[in-house]
């Protein structure tokens, strides 16, 4: 292949790559604006005896949504919705058919929850109150440390009595107990031994101390 032809083809290829990257960068802000507009947009729906799968599919095609339906999602629905957001409309349609709705990032999942899953979701979280008192650790620093642990409820402290008040689940209370056992440990101490030597100076020690004579 001629060198000039090779260089020409290489130049054309570089130009094509440059323009593709430029187009991709221009589309990113447009897509982000579309997502923002979608979240702010209110819709009105009127369904009469409509297949629920067709209803979800129509919304997915109209608003470019990622919707996944399990195989047991079926049946007809009738509803009238006025000025709802897209997510509220999806959740309402799922509830009308007796199904559950879950959103994970940009994916919408429509499924039939098991009785165990429904019971776990509706069961209130039980919390307990415990009071801890530190001996060595400063409660202010303990509060800062516990605040950095994810999943723990905020705690209350009383500096004068070095008291920590916790209102959380039993599992989190056990975590706090382990953290406190580490933070409220006895501080390490250093033992220093010293010997005091009494030295009597005379004229023979004009040029220094005879340490050998003293130590023996």
Image (spheres, grey):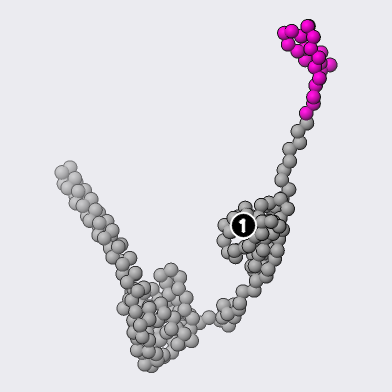
Residue 122 as seen in the image, left or right of residue 111: right
Q: Which residue is mark 1?
A: 143
Residue 209 located within the stretch drawn in magenta:
yes
Q: Residue furthest right?
A: 216
Residue 167 as seen in the image, left or right of residue 194: left
Name above or below for residue 144 compared with residue 75: above
Which x, y percent locates residue 205? Answer: 76, 9
- Mark 1 Cα-neighbour bin, 10 Å: few <14, some 14–19, many ≥20: some
Which corner quadrant of the image does residue 127 belong to?
Answer: bottom right
Viewer-proximal residue, 207 or 66? 207
Residue 205 located within the stretch drawn in magenta:
yes
Q: Residue furthest front?
A: 160
Name above or below for residue 41 compared with residue 202: below
Which corner quadrant of the image does residue 144 belong to?
Answer: bottom right
Which x, y percent locates residue 140? Answer: 62, 54
Q: Residue furthest bottom?
A: 49
Highlighted magenta segment, given as a residue range: 194-216
Residue 178 as seen in the image, left or right of residue 51: right
Tell me what residue is drawn at x 72 percent, y 8 percent: 207
Tell me what residue is drawn at x 22 percent, y 56 percent: 19
The N terminus sits in image quarter: top left
**Would you say residue 1 is visible in this rendering?**
no
The C terminus sits in image quarter: top right
Residue 89 as seen in the image, left or right of residue 122: left
**Would you say residue 150 is visible in this rendering?**
yes
Tell me what residue is drawn at x 38 percent, y 81 percent: 84
* Secondary structure of residue under mark 1: helix
Tell me what residue is drawn at x 41 percent, y 79 percent: 88
Main secondary-structure element of the magenta-colored stretch? loop
Which x, y percent locates residue 162? Answer: 69, 56
Which x, y percent locates residue 65? Answer: 36, 74
């Amino acid at each position: 292949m001629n060198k000039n032809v090779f260089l020409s083809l290489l130049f054309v290829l570089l130009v094509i790559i440059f323009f593709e990257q430029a187009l991709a960068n221009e589309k990113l802000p447009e897509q982000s604006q579309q997502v923002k507009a979608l979240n702010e947009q209110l819709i009105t729906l009127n369904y009469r005896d409509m297949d629920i799968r067709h209803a979800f599919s129509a919304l997915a095609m109209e608003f470019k949504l990622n919707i996944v339906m399990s195989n047991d999602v079926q049946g007809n629905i009738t509803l009238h919705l006025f000025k709802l957001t897209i997510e509220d409309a999806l959740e309402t349609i799922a509830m009308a058919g007796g199904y559950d709705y879950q959103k994970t990032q940009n994916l919408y999942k429509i499924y039939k929850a098991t009785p165990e899953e429904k019971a776990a979701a509706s069961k209130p979280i039980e919390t307990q109150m415990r009071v801890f008192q530190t001996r060595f650790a400063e409660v202010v620093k303990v509060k800062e440390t516990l605040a950095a642990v994810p999943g723990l409820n905020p705690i209350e402290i009383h500096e004068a009595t070095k008291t920590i008040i916790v209102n959380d689940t039993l599992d989190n209370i056990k975590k706090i107990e382990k953290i406190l056992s580490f933070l409220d440990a006895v501080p390490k101490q250093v033992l220093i031994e010293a010997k005091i030597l009494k030295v009597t100076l005379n004229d023979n020690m004009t040029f220094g101390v005879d340490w050998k004579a003293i130590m023996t």
